[in-house]
Image: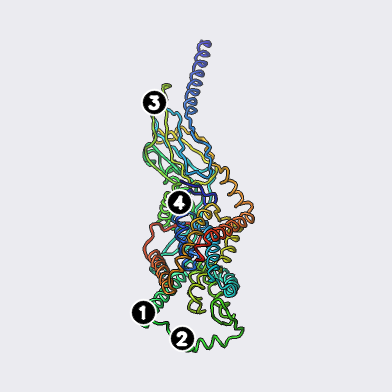
Amino acid sequence: MYIYLPVAHTSVNILIPIALGLSVGLLSGLFGVGGGFLMTPLLIMLGIPPTVAAATDSNQIVAASTSGTFAHWRLGNVDFKMGSVLLVGGFGGGLAGVQFIKVLKAMGNADFVIKLTYVLMLGIVGSYMFAESVAAIRRRKKEHVEAAPKPDSRFTRFLKSLPFQMEFQKSGVTHSVLLPGFFGVFVGLLAAVMGVGGGFLLVPVMVYMLRMPMHVVVGTSLFQILFNCVEVTFLQAYTNHTVDFMLALLLLVGSTLGAQVGTIFGRKLKGEQLKILLAILVLAVTVKMITDLTLTPDLLLGPAGGHGG
Amino acid sequence: MRYLLTKSIIVLTLTVLLLVCLTSGAWAAMTAKANHDDIQMNLTYHGSTVSVSGVTDPGVDLFVKVTSTAKAEEKMMRKDKEAGFLWMNVEQIELNPVPEVYLIRSTKPPEELLDASQLKAESLGYAGLEENIEISPQPSPEQRKSLLGDFIKYKESLGVYSQSVGGIEINPDPSGQQTYHTIFDWPYQAPPGDYVATAYAVKNGKIVDKADCKITVEETGAVKTLDDMAQNNAALYGTLAIGVSLTAGFGVGLVFKGGGSH
């Protein structure tokens, strides 16, 4: 059965966006990522114009991340205090990122910088998470016991010396509020440059830089993504008129269910297993991007507008 | 003698007038009618078919073209290699004027029926259409050819451009003329708007007649309501979209209450 999409001006089989939503929602619930870096290209492949695909994806992420945040909140996996600090930082970073893009566009090399940043960030994050998770699993198998806490490194001591120390009880960590604020700005900046929600960047930052437990990371990341996507959806609808509500409705039918199922599955997996799966996903996207960038395209012309999601 | 001369002049004049009338009668005889000239886009819309038919003089070749009445500028991104090996969007180009939809059929290849200047004058066939498109910034002739070729392929991939030879059914008519009939698959990707189907009769390398008819594609029901709201009441539309998403997220969360919380 087909449905006509009023803003995308195209017709799709109802089952396809529902299935896409289900798959990406599952990943969202599992890993705490919005899934825009997967969903937007898939929607474009379905024949949705790039600008509509990116904007509508933000709209459906609102539903998936609400569903996921709600599920993780009931499991006690959302650190609202940490999420709020990251959110404030991310908002500032996003504003700076938009200005940075304007400068790049004026210089004429925005696309080059964006794509290169995308590939580098995905490659670095994916490789590091993969290597670290494999090492952690091996270590655990070898020792059969939890690793003893390591003595504080020089970097850790430096972090502890920063002012405005704050205890984040849910995450079981104490940091200067400047630290998550700084990383929020950093992720917000990169997310704006790359045109993505930033979940796949924020998750490693919370795991490796803020030392938060993986399950709390997933819930907190979804909380932050929810607010980002509410803002992006409204701006896209208001300024660009590119949100297709019918498409978003079909996607969210799948993604809200997927996010719940993902949360249940995630509960059954260990932190390292979650990290290694996310790393494989991120590396697969990196390989796909590198292939797209290096193989000669069929057409040397493409539609203007849109971003990587 | 004078009477005879006057009579001859009158007969000659009447003959010329009759010939003119007959000739103009033949030119006016070509007709074009679309069977499905008001396409309604509702929620279950998945494209349509448009058949164009009419009568024309016998022994002519035909073009039948369906295109949008409004032609607009289209912005596209040109890809090229950066740093020697990475394919990137390197610049935005503007093509103008380009139709939203361009479907054409002819009884023989366009280049066999008309010369380049006539194809260009009526935008007949991709060759004629391309000649009328300006590209900015102006590319080299080789690059222009390549860009236009890729543009047509891109539009074909969307289903909104097609060119084919054949597919026009021609039959003799009892009146001594001939009827023609062709069916186009109407692409669901074609946006709402006004379109025109034009039939051209070609003989001895010249267009000898043409006729056209209008096709209207319009949104109805929920499609129209949502599209209008998205364009004209964007703040309400955005708020509604967010509200429904939040409600759906919470709703599904409540339904899954048992599963999620163990």
Q: Which amino acid, by three-letter code, is at mark 4?
A: Leu
Q: Chain of mark 4?
A: A
Check disc 2: other Cα within 10 Å, few if <14, some if 14-19, many if 20+. Answer: few
Tag 1–tag 2 contact (CB < 8 Å): no
Instruction: Give SS at disc 2.
Output: loop
Where is A108 relative to B115, above or below? below
Q: CA distance from mark 1 to mark 3?
A: 86 Å
Which is in the foreground here, disc 1 or disc 3? 1
Q: CA distance from mark 2 to mark 3?
A: 94 Å
Tag 4–tag 2 contact (CB < 8 Å): no
Q: Which amino acid, by three-letter code, is at mark 1?
A: Lys
Q: Which amino acid, by three-letter code, is at mark 3?
A: Pro
Which is in the foreground here, disc 4 or disc 3? 4
| Badges 4 and 3, same chain | no
Q: CA distance from mark 4 to mark 1?
A: 43 Å
Which is in the foreground here, disc 4 or disc 2? 2
Q: In the figure, is residue A266 to the left or right of A161?
A: left
Which is in the foreground here, disc 4 or disc 1? 1
Determine which of the numbered discs, if any, sits on residue B172 in the image.
3
Instruction: Give SS at disc 3.
Output: strand
Q: Which residue is mark 4?
A: A15
Of label 1 and label 2, which has the lower sequence position?
Answer: 1
Query: Splitting the image into 4 quarters, where does residue B248 fall?
Result: bottom right
Determine which of the numbered discs, if any, sits on residue A141 in the image.
1
User: Observer-nearest residue: B194 or A36?
Assistant: A36
Q: Which amino acid, by three-letter code, is at mark 2?
A: Pro
Q: Which residue is mark 2?
A: A149
| Badges 4 and 1, same chain | yes
Where is A2 relative to A67, above or below? above
| Badges 1 and 3, same chain | no
User: Observer-nearest residue: A258 or B245?
Assistant: A258
Q: CA distance from mark 4 to mark 2?
A: 50 Å
